[in-house]
Image (cartoon, grey):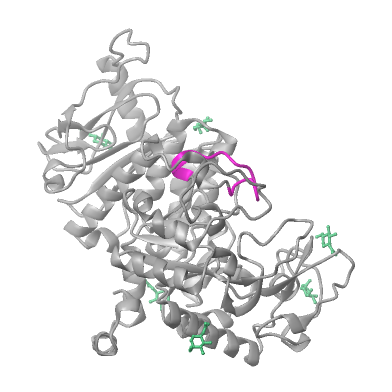
């Protein structure tokens, strides 16, 4: 249910049906999110020829985003997450300007660097017209002022709205103990160039004011969901109160790779969802000298520690981490990572520029203006994303069970991970690998279907038929991912309008078909089966 479209009667009817806020989480589970940093997405006029300094404003706006929604929607995304919208400080600091929107000074004014209030409302209206949801990033941990590194910082609290008095803040201390929650929740984060004056969210006046504020923000602008920045750095009890007041679904940023540290936010009912930092680390590593078996292991750990992995946000890039291609720019690896993100359990979240294979390092270099790509819709990761989002959207349409059950692991070894997502009839069977574009050509096999079914591999648009055991022969090569669906499930879609019969991958130089001999294949299958059973 889209909250913004609720009439009072519809909301009451839903509450009566016993759904309420659960419907919000369920609606978000069906979505696929494209993450936008407003200053870096598009100019008002859509121009693509301007350059800019990465630590200063680059000129992207809400109107720019509104005018370029086709680019996002044509990739199959059904929701957009945007950087914070409230007024920030204007100071220039040693670490740059507030182009990213995270340096709030006035929660009750929109950020005029990104346009007028009407521009923002027009953006939201256009998203909703397209049946797309809007998630807005909000900052609750702190208010911000420039800082000359003289400790303790001298803050002019009168500049903040509404928290215009020292009494709303924790006394200054610098976070130093990252394992001590009192320290990382009550001390001030990141005291370099800016002072992040730390709000005392455990006090009633601060908690009540932030709850009142977010309720108004969501209602005034028809916001459908929130990302809560630095959620780990505010006290636990604040979070559920704040989320409840907002009335919408929220991802809270909990930056940890340790299942028990993240999952407690779910099992204690503190947050409805979190970006999936648990899988982020092993997934990243699997493509950088690690193993896909470690991803499978983490999946099991998370499944047994969290109570609902379906509501985590699957990602491999965001505005805080170095780009995937910064470490290894091999395109086949990026395709496998993208395939996993889009078809994994949970809510896919793709950060702008990932589809253009951007390569920036840590902040601010991971915030490249998207216009430098000229919004190229023929880029290989763009077209892959479009295909896989469409396949996912189609599977959800065919059976809501796609969203309510976690995927089944069909096969895993250090180089491969094959999962089956969704019930028979609308299942997606996919295999990622970490062999890179230099990967060898070989045949392998994966299950997940019934005997003698017609299937389509949608990345290459290849058709084949499952064997008498319901297995698919995979013709692997060049490290490409494989994604199989039933041919019958594609009726009425524009996925793979033209297909060819699947066949062994030819060597890149065209020197001939590189298959494997029967005995090599058999050995391979037995080897994999052993890993599978271990
Ligand atoms: C904050 O602590 C870090 C060590 O964790 C130290 O490097 C930095 O200088 C401190 N900054 C201030 C302003 O105290
Ligand atoms: C945790 O941090 C707080 C605040 O900095 C400090 O008072 C407390 O002693 C620390 N606890 C431990 C166990 O070190
Ligand atoms: C929402 O609108 C109301 C009525 O105009 C206003 O009083 C309130 O401050 C607004 N809230 C926010 C967060 O903009
Ligand atoms: C997860 O735990 C929370 C808090 O106990 C509970 O409200 C929620 O229903 C649980 N979800 C699932 C899928 O078990
Ligand atoms: C893929 O996994 C293997 C086995 O763990 C590892 O040796 C290899 O370096 C990985 N490939 C990449 C590109 O990281
Ligand atoms: C079918 O594929 C699975 C992997 O999903 C494999 O373990 C099994 O050996 C295959 N069976 C046959 C008969 O090919």
Picture layout, residue 88 above or below residue 78: below
In the shown orientation, is residue 390 left or right of residue 248?
A: left
Q: Quadrant of the N terminus?
A: bottom left
Q: Residue at x 58, y 84 (%)?
A: 210
Front residue of 92/152: it is 92
In this view, 297 is above or below 415: below
Q: Quadrant of the C terminus?
A: top left
Please provide percent x and percent y for residue 316: 49, 48
> Residue lying furthest top in this view?
511
Residue 272, image x and y in percent? 44, 73
Q: Nearer the viewer, residue 254 or 523?
A: 254
Q: Residue furthest front?
A: 45
User: Toward the viewer: 122 or 83?
Assistant: 122
Residue at image point 46% right, 69% down: 120
Magenta residues?
354-367
Q: Position of residue 486 (x, y in %)?
A: 16, 43
**Rendered image quadrant of residue 57:** bottom right
Can you say whether 195 is above or below 445 in the image? Answer: below
In the rendered view, tell whether residue 222 sits above or below residue 475.
Answer: below
Residue at coordinates 31% horizontally, 69% vertically from top-left? 27
User: Would you say residue 19 is visible in this rendering?
Assistant: yes
Can residue 302 be spotted in the picture? no
């Amino acid at each position: 249910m889209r909250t913004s479209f609720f009439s009072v009667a519809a909301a009451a009817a839903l509450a009566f049906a016993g759904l309420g806020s659960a419907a919000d989480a369920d609606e978000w589970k069906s979505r696929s999110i494209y993450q936008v940093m407003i200053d870096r997405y598009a100019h008002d006029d859509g121009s693509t020829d301007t350059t800019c300094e990465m630590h200063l404003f680059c000129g992207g706006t809400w109107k720019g985003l509104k005018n370029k929604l086709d680019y996002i929607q044509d990739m199959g995304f059904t929701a957009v997450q945007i950087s914070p919208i409230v007024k920030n400080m204007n100071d220039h600091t040693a670490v740059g300007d507030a182009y990213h929107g995270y340096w709030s000074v006035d929660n009750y004014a929109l950020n005029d660097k990104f346009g007028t209030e009407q521009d923002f409302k027009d953006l939201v209206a256009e998203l909703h017209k397209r049946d797309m949801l809007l998630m807005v990033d909000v900052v609750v941990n702190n208010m911000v002022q420039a800082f000359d590194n003289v400790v303790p910082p001298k803050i002019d609290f009168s500049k903040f709205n509404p928290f215009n008095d020292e009494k709303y803040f924790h006394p200054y201390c610098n976070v130093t103990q990252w394992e001590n929650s009192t320290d990382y929740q009550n001390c001030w984060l990141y005291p370099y160039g800016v002072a992040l004056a730390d709000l005392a969210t455990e006090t009633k006046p601060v908690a009540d004011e932030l709850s009142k504020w977010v309720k108004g923000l969501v209602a005034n602008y028809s916001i459908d969901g929130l990302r809560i920045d630095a959620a780990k750095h505010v006290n636990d009890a604040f979070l559920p109160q704040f989320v409840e007041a907002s009335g919408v679904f929220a991802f809270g940023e909990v930056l940890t790779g340790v299942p028990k540290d993240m999952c407690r936010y779910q099992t204690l009912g503190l947050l409805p969802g979190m970006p999936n930092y648990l899988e982020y680390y092993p997934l990243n590593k699997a493509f950088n000298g690690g193993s896909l078996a470690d991803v499978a292991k983490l999946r099991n750990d998370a499944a047994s520690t969290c109570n609902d992995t379906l509501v985590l946000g699957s990602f491999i890039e965001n505005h805080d981490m170095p780009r995937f291609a910064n470490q290894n720019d091999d395109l086949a690896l990026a395709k496998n990572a993208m395939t996993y993100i889009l078809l994994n359990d949970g809510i896919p979240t793709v950060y702008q520029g990932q589809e253009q294979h951007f390569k920036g390092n840590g902040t601010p270099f991971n915030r490249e203006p998207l216009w430098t790509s000229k919004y190229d819709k023929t880029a290989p990761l763009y077209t892959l994303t479009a295909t896989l989002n469409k396949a996912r959207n189609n599977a959800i349409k065919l059976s809501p069970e796609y969203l309510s059950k976690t995927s089944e692991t069909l096969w895993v070894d250090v180089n491969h991970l094959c999962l089956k997502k969704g019930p028979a009839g609308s299942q997606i069977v996919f295999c990622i690998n970490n062999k890179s574009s230099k990967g060898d050509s070989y045949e392998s096999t994966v299950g997940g279907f019934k005997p003698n079914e017609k299937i389509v591999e949608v990345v290459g648009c290849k058709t084949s038929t499952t064997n008498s055991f319901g297995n698919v022969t995979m013709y692997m090569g060049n490290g490409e991912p494989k994604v199989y669906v039933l041919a019958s499930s594609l009726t009425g879609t524009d996925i793979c309008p033209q297909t060819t019969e699947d066949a062994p991958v030819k060597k890149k130089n065209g020197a001939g078909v590189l298959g494997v001999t029967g005995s090599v294949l058999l050995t391979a299958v037995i080897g994999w089966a052993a890993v599978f059973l271990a």
